[in-house]
Image (cartoon, rainbow, N blue to C red):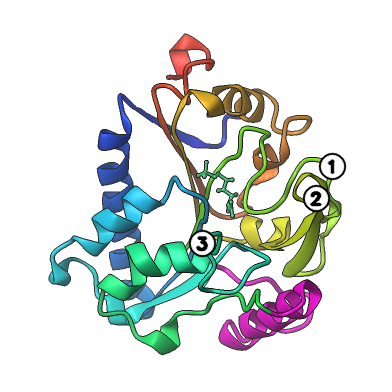
């Protein structure tokens, strides 16, 4: 059993998302108090939408949005106005609703060819975090989801990206989509101060069990292991249904 994680199981999504919003706000406060800024990488897919809407609805004084720097853990290889775009989803549910500084929103320019988009985003990370060669950025928070196949960000089972240990961002070919995805690599995920997974629904239960049961041999999401950071798993009861009784 993967023990170095903080597992929180909620009876329903309606309980999980407010708790995730509270955790987000707590982490933002601490980071802004200690370093004057909060750096967060948003996850894509459908699960974070409800959290983003909740965050957008928070009283303005709850989070100093002008000191929050937004990045994306992965992106589909589509332009920012495409219905599949993670940037578009985050912009419609959160970024366009809060007083964030536009220059503090770092989207993946996935309208370019995938390798160029990946290299461009790496350069943005190197510049923003002032990285020397071989260094990795330390995000205050990286948000991640989980696919039924156990993928996270766009690190899919069987994909080349699983073995990338030097790059920060790569164009990862995903056979089942016959398409590239642009994604953070494991070293970036593992250098975060906090990684927060959110997964809801029965279709995730098998992947959750495999991830938590076997960190090493399990699916890609199980290999995320912050070196000096927290690993949070926020699950609803359905997603946690196959976990040993004691752990949920
Ligand atoms: C993406 C995501 C991906 C997502 C999972 C879960 O671009 O799709 O970053 O990793 O988090 O696929 O997706 P759902 O939340 O839609 O189930």
| The disc label shown at residue 234, or none | none
Q: Residue at x 57, y 68 (%)?
A: 138
Q: Magenta segment range?
A: 112-140
In 3D space, how far apart are the residues under numbered discs 3 and 2 (Cα atoms)?
27 Å
Q: Is residue 70 above or below residue 228?
A: below
Image location (x, y in percent) of residue 146: 57, 40
Q: Are marks 1 and 2 in contact (CB under 8 Å)?
A: yes
Tag 1 residue: 158
Q: Is residue 163 visible?
A: yes
The secondary structure type at the circle numbered 3 is: loop
Image location (x, y in percent) of residue 40: 46, 67
Mark 3 beta carbon near ligand 1 (under 8 Å):
no
**Are there few (<14), some (14-19), or many (20+) residues within 10 Å of tag 2?**
some
Viewer-side label of 1, 2: 1
In 3D space, how far apart are the residues under numbered discs 1 and 2 (Cα atoms)?
8 Å
Tag 3 residue: 83
Image location (x, y in percent) of residue 223: 70, 42
Viewer-side label of 3, 1: 3
Q: Residue at x 18, y 61 (%)?
A: 58
| The disc label shown at residue 162, or none | 2
């Amino acid at each position: 059993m993967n023990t170095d994680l903080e597992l929180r199981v909620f009876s329903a999504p309606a309980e999980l998302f407010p708790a995730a919003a509270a955790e987000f706000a707590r982490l933002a406060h601490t980071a802004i108090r200690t370093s004057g800024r909060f750096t967060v990488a948003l996850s894509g897919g459908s699960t974070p939408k409800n959290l983003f809407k909740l965050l957008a609805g928070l009283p303005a004084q709850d989070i100093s949005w002008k000191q929050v720097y937004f990045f994306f853990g992965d992106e589909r290889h589509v332009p920012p106005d495409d219905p599949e775009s993670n940037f578009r989803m985050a912009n419609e549910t959160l970024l366009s609703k809060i007083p964030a500084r536009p220059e503090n929103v770092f989207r993946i320019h996935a309208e370019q060819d995938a390798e160029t988009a990946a290299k461009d985003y790496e350069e943005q990370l190197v510049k923003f975090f002032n990285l020397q060669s071989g260094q990795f950025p330390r995000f205050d928070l990286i948000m991640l989801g989980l696919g039924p196949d156990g993928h996270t960000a766009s690190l899919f089972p069987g994909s080349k990206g699983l073995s990338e240990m030097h790059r920060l961002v790569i164009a990862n070919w995903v056979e089942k989509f016959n398409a590239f995805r642009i994604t953070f690599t494991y070293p970036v995920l593992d250098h975060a101060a906090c990684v927060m997974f959110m997964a809801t629904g029965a279709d995730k239960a098998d992947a959750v069990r495999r991830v938590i049961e076997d960190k090493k041999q399990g699916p890609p999401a199980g290999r995320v292991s912050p070196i000096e950071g927290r690993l949070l798993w926020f699950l609803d009861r359905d997603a946690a249904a196959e976990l040993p009784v004691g752990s949920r």
